[in-house]
Image: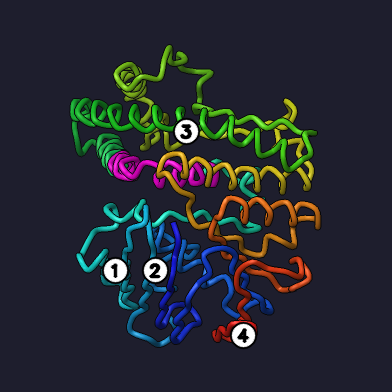
């Protein structure tokens, strides 16, 4: 998978940007707050339909009516065109894939990209929400149907929670819960089954990457944690059929307590992902160096997992990551990316982070303007 061209208009701080990329390494150099990250964010948004902002309107340049981003890319040697218009007035975004209007759920997985930024280092010690988000993004790109299943689960969860509140306020009958218990159990079973399989795949891939980066000194393991498992019977297997019945019984047993609290106390929306280095929990005992290495190992595992499912590597986006790695690890990382022919976009403040000979392109970014280094 390769992006040949990026066109941005009124996106973040870019009035207009028309950029032809190298198929290998693309380095964007400049001081902070010049727009380097915005270029990577445009690709990430085109891939996932989400950005690191609270609402889409923040992606539109100040005092403009709409932002436009367009990507020309190839997938399995077939050329595609993806265009997304983001209105500033909160109207729905408009998405065109190869000239045809599509909904967001239909373009997830069309353009695969993996983004790694310093924020990922906080994933291990932040709330479970960040780790579930990581897992959801990985699976959604590898299996787009998962995104649809997750959307269905969240909608059913919201509806069940609304009903619980109405029952608590004597505005609805408890008998109405059975329908939502059954539907939510079906949705939860599909999600958990896919998550367990994904964690198994990531486990072996991430361990290999961790050993490579740490010079064979560290073993990495991932463990999926079902919320409140100490108070419910552990699942005997992870087939969808078994899990549907398992979830249904648990939801049913918690009807009364859930009504009192006005929310659903069990389900995949509360699960977590744990990481262990040489048998010790990373969240509690990991050093800063181990956090960096593990975050990088996970991202490299993610791109390998996407290659296994799609048949080719996704685009790799490295935002200010080189400053977090020592010289040896930077060199090893670049060697790996070049050897695997992974198209990569890297932002940095210093050219010194890179070897003198770069196989690709170097762009200079200043105040929303980008030029190719001669």
Instruction: Identify the residue position indicated by label 2 in the image.
Output: 56
Residue 366 numbered mark, or none: 4
Q: Nearer the viewer, mark 4 or mark 2?
A: 4
Give neighbour class at mark 1: few <14, some 14-19, many 20+ (Cα, 10 Å): some
Return the residue at label 1: 93
Residue 211 visible here:
yes
Disc 2 on helix, strand or loop?
A: helix
Q: Earlier in the sequence, mark 1 or mark 3?
A: 1
Element under label 3? helix
* In front: label 2 or label 3: 3
Q: Earlier in the sequence, mark 4 or mark 3?
A: 3
Name the residue rendered at 22%, 68% in the picture.
99
- Residue assigned mark 3: 198
Name which residue lies at 62% across and 78% down: 33
Earlier in the chain: of badge 2 and badge 3, it is 2
Lower sequence index among marks 4 and 1: 1
């Amino acid at each position: 998978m390769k992006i040949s061209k990026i066109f941005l208009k009124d996106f973040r701080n870019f009035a207009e940007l028309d950029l032809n990329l190298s198929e290998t390494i693309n380095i964007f150099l400049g001081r902070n707050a010049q727009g380097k990250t915005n270029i990577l964010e445009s690709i990430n948004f085109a891939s996932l339909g989400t950005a690191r902002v609270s609402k889409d309107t923040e992606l539109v340049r100040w005092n403009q009516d709409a932002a436009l981003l367009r990507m020309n890319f190839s997938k399995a040697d077939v050329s595609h065109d993806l265009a997304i218009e983001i209105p500033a007035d909160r109207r729905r975004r408009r998405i065109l894939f190869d000239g045809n209007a599509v909904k967001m759920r239909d373009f997830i997985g069309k353009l695969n990209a993996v983004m790694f930024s310093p924020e990922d280092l906080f994933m291990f010690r932040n709330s479970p929400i960040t780790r579930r988000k990581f897992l959801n993004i990985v699976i959604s790109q590898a299996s787009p149907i998962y995104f649809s299943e997750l959307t269905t689960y969240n909608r059913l969860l919201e509806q069940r929670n609304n009903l619980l509140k109405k029952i608590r306020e004597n505005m609805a009958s408890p008998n109405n819960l059975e329908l939502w218990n059954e539907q939510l159990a079906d949705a939860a079973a599909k999600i958990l089954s896919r998550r367990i399989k994904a964690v198994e795949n990531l486990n072996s891939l991430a361990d290999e990457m961790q050993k490579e980066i740490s010079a064979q000194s560290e073993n990495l393991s991932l463990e999926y944690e079902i919320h409140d498992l100490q108070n419910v019977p552990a699942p005997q297997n992870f087939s969808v059929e078994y899990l549907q019945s398992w979830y249904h019984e648990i939801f049913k047993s918690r009807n009364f307590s859930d009504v009192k609290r006005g929310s659903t106390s069990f389900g995949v929306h509360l699960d977590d992902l744990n990481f262990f280095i040489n048998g010790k929990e990373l969240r509690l005992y990991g050093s800063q160096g181990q956090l960096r290495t593990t975050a990088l190992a996970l991202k490299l595992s993610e791109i390998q997992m996407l290659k296994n499912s799609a048949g080719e590597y996704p685009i790799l986006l490295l935002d200010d990551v080189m400053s977090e790695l020592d010289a040896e690890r930077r060199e090893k990382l670049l060697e790996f990316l070049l050897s695997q022919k992974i198209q990569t976009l890297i932002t940095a403040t210093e050219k010194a982070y890179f070897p003198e000979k770069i196989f690709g392109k170097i762009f200079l970014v200043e105040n929303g303007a980008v030029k190719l280094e001669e």
